[in-house]
Amino acid sequence: MSSESDTQAAFKRTQDFGEKPTEVRQTNHYQDEYVHGFVERWDELIDWDGRAASEGRFFIDTLKRYGCKTVLDAAAGTGFHSVQLLKAGFDVTTVDGSPQMLIQAFNNAHERGLILSTVRSDWRWLSRDIAGRYDALICLGNSFTHIFDEHDRRRALAEFYSMLNHNGILILDQRNYDALLDGTSGPGHKYYYCGEHVSAEPDHVDNGLARFKYTFPGNDTFYLNMYPLRRDYVHKLMNDVGFQHVNTYGDFQSTYDNNSEPDFFIHVVEKAYRESDEDIISADWKAEPLPVEEYSDAVKTAQAYYNSDDAENFYSSLWGGEDIHIGLYQSNDEPVIDASHRTVEHMAEQIGPSLRGAEVLDIGGGYGGSARYIAREYQAKVVSLNLSEVQNRRGRRQNLEQGLADQVRIVDGDFENIPYRDNSFDVVWSQDAMLHSGNRVRVLEEARRVLKPGGTLIFTDPMADDECPKGVLAPILARIQLDTMGSPGFYRKELNRLGFTERDFDVHTEQVSMHYGRVREELNKRADELVSNGTISQTYVDNMREGLGHWVDGGKAGYLAWGIMIFDG
């Protein structure tokens, strides 16, 4: 940071972003943004009493839970958290990159009978400016978003890591930029910026800039240019630099509803290496999963399809919106939803008593119907991993409506990169989902990795018969935009290679043509109604009729296989 810029900021009361303020995207520019005129009004925005009431004892209790005594407040601002933590008995070092903020922080503490130990430092060189290590480092107030360069973000996180004791924690917060970028909500005024007569609103938002406008009584106006960090991206950066486990809270709630969009995310991040590779689920089964890797092309294709309005309305209207997989039919006219649910019941019975109280991962869980049944009937704790955010939103609502939000967690993600650590689950469950992967070997390897020793893999999947002639399934493959399908022989070979032992293959191949035929009958009955009221498009109806016909024909010709496969690890 330049000393000339510091001197200028000490006397300036107004900001200068030049002629093109939205093009100012440099990390160091925050020095010129926190001018004296802005800093001296900052506490009106924070409202110390309002902020203290909104966050309660969250940070104090979190630090105590981890046994922390020494704390480095790396983005102290005007000193609110340093003062709160000093009062609570912590040994605090107060750090900020803005000299104006540090002066204000020191004065605020002095007025309350406290003396701050202050250090001015840039996060990228913390270990140069500050000696020793700490039990915790906090970086609050949306401060990390002042860094625009990814290299600088990684450097800062690496410095944070180096300043912590071996079992230390980092607590870092950020605005919910996902909601701002996706247009699902705007910033609130409840938890962080509590000043009643001050507004903090986005002036400009794009993928590389979130420019906020702060208006104070008297129409004094200031701006901050910040980088809009997405939550999962921050998770990935933290893991990349060595942090072991990230647990994210939304507005101080660990189980926030994704539909309600919190204003802020608070990441509580552990440095300690879990030597026993303990699973996240056992320690806190609803803890935030590991960051999601980039989806493969096949997964992206399936995701786009299931997120579409036509697909969502079709599956929720004609397939029941609860269980969306092949059913076990007892008659030719049985409702699709009843037969589909029977498959879930039968699969659970096949596993037996070991399912009771188990920790289960359902990969490709759809709306979460299977997860809810297992949780309700077997008192299991279930994570439903699914790639469609649209389906997941419906599933979370159903969790709440059925009183199962404490037993079932629905997670956005895909089974080619399962976002949980090794040996995390007693059972991995899947229904008619693996066919959507372009790398089924990877899916099976991931299932093996997250299963505990002795765990069970149970799944169904529409497959090619082992004796299926080459090329005859081309219409089906074209429909699902893939080059191949699995087969019983393929699954047996790969799972044997991974050390599994086959327990059973409960064959019900005849159900393929039965099921898709029943779905086609229901579609034909209701197509005119659904198209006329705008629920689904005529093009979708035509394509679905054709696709369902290919499945019926393939099943009747003996080219397909289907049933319940069970393997023990």
Image (cartoon, helix red, strand yellow):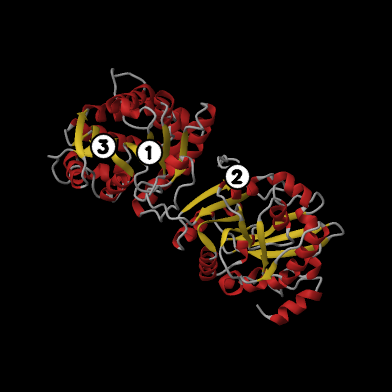
Query: Residue 261 has which mark?
Result: 2
Q: Which callout, 1 or 3, points at the residue further toward the start of the chain?
A: 1
Q: Report crowding for label 1: few under 14, some 14 to 19, many 20 or more residues within 10 A (C-alpha).
A: many
Q: In which quarter of the image is residue 508?
A: top left
Q: Which callout, 3 or 2, points at the residue further toward the start of the chain?
A: 2
**In this view of the protein, which residue sits in the foreground, 144 or 19?**
144
Q: Position of residue 372 (x, y in %)?
A: 43, 29
Badge 1 is on which residue? 361
Helix, strand or loop under label 3: loop
In whole angstroms, how far apart are the C-alphas of marks 1 and 2?
Answer: 25 Å
Give amino acid for label 1: Leu
Q: Report crowding for label 3: few under 14, some 14 to 19, many 20 or more residues within 10 A (C-alpha).
A: many
Q: Quadrant of residue 557?
A: top left
In whole angstroms, how far apart are the C-alphas of marks 3 and 2?
Answer: 37 Å
Nearer the observer, disc 1 or disc 3? 1
Badge 3 is on which residue? 462
Q: Position of residue 151 (x, y in %)?
A: 51, 70
Does any portion of residue 263 appear in the rendered image? no
Q: Position of residue 44 (x, y in %)?
A: 80, 56
Does any portion of residue 506 appear in the rendered image? yes
Nearer the observer, disc 3 or disc 2? 2
Give amino acid for label 3: Pro
